[in-house]
Amino acid sequence: MRTIQGVSVSAGIAIGTVRVLAAVDYAVERRLIDDPQAEMDRFRAARDTAVAQLKQLRDNVAAEFGENKAELFDAHRLMLQDPDYAECVEGLIAQDKVNAEFAVKSAAEQFAAMFAAMDSSTMQARAADVKDVSRRVMNVLQGKRDSTAQDGSVQGDAVQNGIVQNGIAQNGESHIIFAEDLAPSDTAQLDRAKVLGLMTAKGSANSHTAILARTMGLPAITGIGDAFDPADDGHVAVIDGTSGAVFVDPDEATLTEYRRRKAEAEEHLSLLRKLKGKPTETKSGQRVHLYANISRPSDAAAVLANDAEGIGLFRSEFLYLEREDWPTEEFQFDAYGQVAQEMGDRPVIIRTLDIGADKQVDYFNLSHEDNPALGYRAIRICLTRPEIFKVQLRALLRASAYGNIAIMLPMITSVQEVRDAKRILEEAKSELRGERIDFNESIQIGVMIETPASVIMADELAAEVDFFSIGTNDLTQYTLACDRQNPSLERFADPHSPAVLRMIQMTIEAAHRHGIWCGICGELGADLSLTDTFLRLGIDELSVSPTSVLPLRNVIRNH
């Protein structure tokens, strides 16, 4: 058995034989031409045909996966219709007297290099997109048929390598596909019934190919590089789309373990098929919004895969914890924007950084504290170091132009803290207006209720914000005066304590008196023994780990 470590881009487990896609040579002959105008006309006609093909592909994807996922191919059409792109191609034809195919390839390389040189990882991923659309134009110029042709014929890397014909593996079997890279258009045309999973040497989690793999529910790993041997074509492999691990020629123990995991996942998938798209609603008609908690942008795939209605808690501090230096505004904007775009219209509630206590970061240079849980943490850092806070707020505001983002403030104990935070937010908004940068002017602001002080002040706090979210982990700790990091206090730190439940009740009642909604984003939200209690208390939203969404929906719908 050989183990290879790649980068996870789409969760899931695939077990099967590997088919290797040979790299396609896109070498184009450079020919001198006598009639530049005729060559420009060839390019324009090919571009128009490619745009029509993309429209057909867009409609196919929309029909199967929804309008939101089809927007990628609208973006591809816009790339082809971009005046700068056409000007570059036609300029090469006119100035260098070269054939249209060569001009298109040269223009694609120029634009791809420009995208790859940008600081934003999202923009870097667009390099693959411009190559994809340009390849499509070259195929038309060279007389190759496209997979979206009316006669149902299939064209593209996968077909040229003999993997699929009309979307079906030619030998009738299903395979794990390995390729140097896969274009978004090729990925969208794969038959999910015949493709078990994807591995690529190149690519990124931000690429449209990765997003499509997640949408299609295909386990996918990228960044393998040259660790995979093409000679392993036909060998058995296991790919773990969650950890990014690949096992080639797995031993019996590995096979047994992954078959067990896969069976559990399929049982979960059965529940998903039964409940997907169904409202989280009791038999009596009580509606609860069911969201999921995440720590990283890549976790959004699991939110969608488990059919959560949104993200109720994005723990943004992990963008700080996983770096050795301050995350820049651009880095954060990239992360928040990626999640917002992937979630579409679904809410994405992002908690501002909650550093301190058990989450320490060296470059913050925080002083030693005897009791850090009661110390300098979360909103206290943000309000005393506004230069850090404003960088995050600017990134959040900019990302709000790309989806349904809301901002949530942690560790609030007073109305003044909320007002101070809102003042810094208004400063960030004013700066962005001056820079003519778009953002959602009416972005919602909420607070986490996780201290007894915030419960007692809930009526006053509700007048300042749009929603409450109860962090039951810290609320239990502070209500019962039990350090959640101290294992010897486990028997005393009872989250089912009447004192904790009464705190939750008081918070919900205060929220409803002031016309705002109240949710729970702590671990208690997934405790099925308390679901009945939360429903009786009138909770509006529960945000849990992605894998807890469907079991919780099942319980609520049967209530």
Image (cartoon, rainbow, N blue to C red):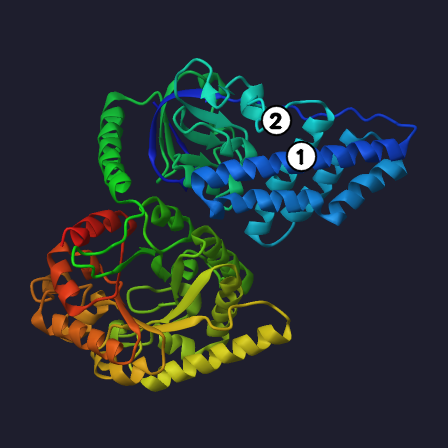
**In the picture provided, is 276 more to the left or to the right than 27?**
left
Q: In percent of the image, x 24 and y 47: which residue is there?
A: 550
Residue indicated by mark 2: 146
The residue closer to the viewer here, 432 or 63, is: 63
The residue closer to the viewer here, 319 or 73, is: 73
User: Where does the image place residue 141, in percent across and percent down from the top left?
Assistant: 74, 27
**In the picture provided, is 408 more to the left or to the right than 147?**
left
Q: Residues within 10 Å of mark 1 (few under 14, many from 20)?
A: many
Q: In percent of the image, x 42 and y 16: which residue is there?
A: 234
User: Where does the image place residue 200, in percent across and percent down from the top left?
Assistant: 49, 32
CB under 8 Å between discs 2 and 1: no
Residue indicated by mark 1: 50
Tell which residue pokes out farthest to the top in this image. 171
User: Where does the image place residue 159, in percent across and percent down from the top left?
Assistant: 55, 21
**In the picture provided, is 524 more to the left or to the right than 21?**
left
Q: Which mark is residue 236?
A: none
Task: Look at label 2 and name its amino acid.
Answer: Asp
- On the question of residue 210 being in view, the answer is no
User: Where does the image place residue 36, in percent across and percent down from the top left?
Assistant: 89, 34
SS under mark 1: helix
Q: In percent of the image, x 44 and y 27: which residue is there?
A: 191
SS under mark 2: loop
